[in-house]
């Protein structure tokens, strides 16, 4: 009796989350795969099976490759900078700075607390080429006027800047939490051996923070790949699709163009892409990470 | 007797509930009349507190009509509104009334989402004839009228009179031809080194596809022939228009290659640009914000003046109860009366959709004081229906993307438009084939 109970009870406990996962994750993914094999749009109101045609069209479309490239550039640039800033701030703010420490912590974390829509609109004004504060200050350093969101080359960097400003506080908080857990005796020992601040950071802090870093990387990649709100609010993918990213492209197809087949094909490609990137990174990072201290 | 009547009403209510699950139909009121509640999606396509004006008009309507309650739902600007309508229709829960961007008409038709309004229009002799004909171009299909003009506009050219005076141009004469436009723009552009401190002319981004259509009309061409089901994105007239744009932006460098629809009115107000192509719908915003005298004029001509009309039309949806459709018509008829049309025009800067609205005393007073309000109306003589086709959102993205690339100087106007044409033919192949 007890053994049966023991065998069944874990599954019983899993049922609530299983139901939610099936309803909101597994079923939609499978159904996306199914719809992606159909032509289903305004001209074909009833889904018609077309095999991999949606994928063929997609991979043959230069715009898709531009969107994919924009997304990868966004991920590849924002994550390292966000992480570096978060880590440096966390290490500095973990030092004893007296009452200033909390003030700095609040200052660094505050962008994260602003609603995304408000932050995006704030930056639209800050970045306004004519009357925005950023160009105003840049001009006082003699930097020529930049058209930011109006410009094909500067629009994506401008969005990345906003994202970094908005997100690094969150990762800083996670790093701070990680830092609080590091054993003090190691630092004491290092001090006795005469190690300086930078030595300690390089030889103790960074290696011991590796598990936190894995978490930050994975969460960072997922949030970066999912960037939508900033693009939607600041540029709507423009000018000339230079800020169009995968999730926004999916939204355009599925909701604006009412092309459900293509929207689903894009979703499938997106899921595969994000899983692949995470798998590769986990492999790389896990090899160097030790979870016990 | 009384019990009988109640029973009958109960029966009827049940029928309605069965027929339209999810629709809120209220119980019999004291007089035995049922209150009809209507959902009304409306967008605000231009800057300014217009949502409040719409809400105010709806409240007035509700107060005058005890058995109809219109519930206004602000649905963002035009693109999100269409998206909400599309999703609601697909989900089997359409709004009763919506104001939708006029070029979405073929998409709504293809979805089978809306009803023709001819039977209602026939109840009011002379009603439809009062509307400006150019505004009805985007309402008609196969001899029937499906949409009623509401917030309608044409693009106009705004010019900063102070800037004109400053560079020795006559502040009262805006450019009337493309050549003059290019000439004036060069004189109005100010630079420190290579840095432009004031642009000569800004052709607003965001809806540059709509402004571009006007330029094509000014060259005597057309982008999409809806009734002939033909796409002409790479016609000689279109190429000529885009070449002129690229000349302004890349050749002479007197206009910014890219901008957004919402940010250019503040740019004009801040003196960042001396001339601005934008909707007439921002007139009231400019009036309340600019601290310099400015004017509004016809868009300059190439071989002719020309403009594509713009804005939103009322549509009534299919698959809602008959009494909702009837009530929806009552509302549309009420809010497009000459009095309401002129009130709405004055509050927003949109063109009053019917000619007789301009005969009203308050409208007369307004236009005597501010003749700019008449510019867009008079330009209607050179106005054409806006280009439209099914999946218009896609059509728009294709054209915008081609324009953006050419405006940046990345591809030649001809190549950009050839590519757009090709993509259009691929996207609309099933529509073009049914010709």
Image: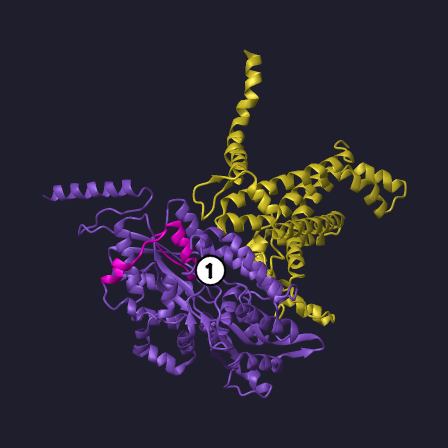
Residue B168 painted magenta = no
A29 on left or right of A156: left
Residue B351 occupies which quadrant of the picture? bottom left
The residue lying toward the viewer, choosing from A178 and B82, is B82
Residue at image coords 29%, 60%:
B331
Could you say which chain is coloured purple in the image?
B
Above or below for B1 versus B290: above
Q: Which residues are magenta?
A: B95-123
Residue A271 occupies which quadrant of the picture? top right
Give the drawing colour for chain A: yellow
Above or below for A109 versus A125: above
Res A276 seen here: yes
Query: Mark 1 — on which chain does it sit?
Result: B
Q: Which residue is mark 1?
A: B230
Above or below for B77 versus A254: below
Residue at image coords 43%, 50%:
B86
Single out the residue that lies furthest toward the top: A1
Q: Position of residue A4 (x, y in %)?
A: 55, 14
B300 on left or right of B109: right
Residue at image coords 57%, 52%:
A229
């Amino acid at each position: 009796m007890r053994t049966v109970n023991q065998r069944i009870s874990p599954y019983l406990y899993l049922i609530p989350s299983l139901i939610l996962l099936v309803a909101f994750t597994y079923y939609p993914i499978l159904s996306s795969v199914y719809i992606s094999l159909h032509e289903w749009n305004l001209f074909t109101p009833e889904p018609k099976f077309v095999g991999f045609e949606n994928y063929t069209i997609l991979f043959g479309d230069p715009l898709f490759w531009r969107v994919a490239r924009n997304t990868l550039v966004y991920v590849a640039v924002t994550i390292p900078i966000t992480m570096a800033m978060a880590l440096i701030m966390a290490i500095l703010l973990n030092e004893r700075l007296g009452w200033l420490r909390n003030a700095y912590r609040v200052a660094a974390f505050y962008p994260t607390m602003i609603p995304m829509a408000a932050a995006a609109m704030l930056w639209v004004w800050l970045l306004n080429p004519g009357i925005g504060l950023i160009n105003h200050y840049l001009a006082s350093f003699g930097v020529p006027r930049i058209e930011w969101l109006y410009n094909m080359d500067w629009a994506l960097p401008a969005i990345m800047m906003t994202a970094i400003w908005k997100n690094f506080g969150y990762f800083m908080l996670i790093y701070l939490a990680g830092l609080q857990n590091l054993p003090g005796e190691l630092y004491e020992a290092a001090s006795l051996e005469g190690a300086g601040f930078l030595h300690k950071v390089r030889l103790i802090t960074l290696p011991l923070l590796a598990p936190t870093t894995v978490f930050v990387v994975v969460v960072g990649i997922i949030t970066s790949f999912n960037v939508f709100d900033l693009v939607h609010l600041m540029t709507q993918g423009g000018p000339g699709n230079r800020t169009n990213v995968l999730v926004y492209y999916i939204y355009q197809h599925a909701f604006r163009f009412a092309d459900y087949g293509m929207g689903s094909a894009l979703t499938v490609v997106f899921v595969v892409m994000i899983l692949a990137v995470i798998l590769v990174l986990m492999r790389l990072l896990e090899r160097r990470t030790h979870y016990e201290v | 007797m009384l019990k009988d009547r109640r029973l009958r009403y109960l029966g009827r209510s049940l029928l309605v509930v069965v027929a339209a699950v999810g629709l809120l139909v209220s119980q019999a009121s004291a007089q035995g009349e049922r209150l009809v509640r209507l959902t009304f999606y409306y967008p605000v396509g231009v800057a300014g507190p217009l949502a409040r004006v719409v809400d105010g008009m709806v409240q007035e309507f509700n107060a005058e009509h005890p058995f109809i309650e219109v519930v206004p739902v602000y649905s963002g600007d035009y693109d999100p509104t269409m998206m909400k309508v599309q999703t609601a229709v697909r989900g089997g829960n359409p709004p009763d009334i919506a104001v939708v961007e006029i070029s979405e008409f073929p998409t709504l038709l293809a979805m089978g989402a809306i009803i023709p309004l001819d039977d209602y229009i026939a109840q009011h002799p002379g009603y439809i004839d009062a509307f400006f004909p150019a505004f009805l171009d985007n309402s008609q299909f196969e001899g029937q009228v499906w949409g009623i003009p509401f917030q309608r506009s044409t693009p106009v050219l705004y010019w900063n009179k102070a800037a004109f005076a400053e560079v020795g141009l006559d502040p009262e004469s805006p450019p009337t031809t493309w050549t003059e436009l290019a000439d004036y723009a060069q004189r109005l552009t100010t630079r420190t080194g290579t840095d432009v401190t004031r642009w000569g002319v800004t052709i607003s981004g965001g809806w540059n596809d709509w402004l571009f259509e006007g330029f094509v009309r000014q060259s005597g061409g057309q982008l999409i022939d809806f009734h002939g089901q033909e796409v002409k994105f790479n016609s000689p007239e279109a190429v000529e228009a885009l070449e002129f744009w690229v000349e302004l932006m890349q050749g002479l460098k007197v206009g910014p290659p890219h901008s957004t629809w919402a940010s250019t009115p503040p740019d004009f107000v801040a003196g960042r640009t001396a001339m601005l192509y934008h909707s007439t719908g921002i007139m009231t915003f400019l009036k309340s914000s600019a601290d310099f005298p400015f004017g509004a004029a016809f868009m300059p001509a190439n071989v002719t003046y020309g403009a594509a009309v713009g804005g939103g039309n009322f549509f009534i949806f299919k698959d809602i109860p008959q009494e909702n459709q009837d009530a929806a018509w009552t509302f549309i008829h009420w809010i497009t009366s000459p009095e309401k049309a002129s009130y709405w025009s004055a509050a927003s800067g949109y063109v009053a959709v019917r000619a007789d609205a301009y005969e009203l005393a308050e409208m007369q007073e307004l236009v005597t004081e501010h003749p700019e309000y008449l510019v867009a109306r008079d330009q209607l003589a050179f106005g054409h229906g806006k280009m439209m086709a099914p999946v218009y959102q896609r059509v728009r993205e294709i054209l915008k993307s081609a324009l953006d690339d050419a405006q940046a100087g990345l591809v030649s106007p001809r190549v950009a438009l050839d590519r757009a044409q090709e993509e259009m033919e691929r996207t609309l192949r099933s529509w073009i084939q049914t010709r």
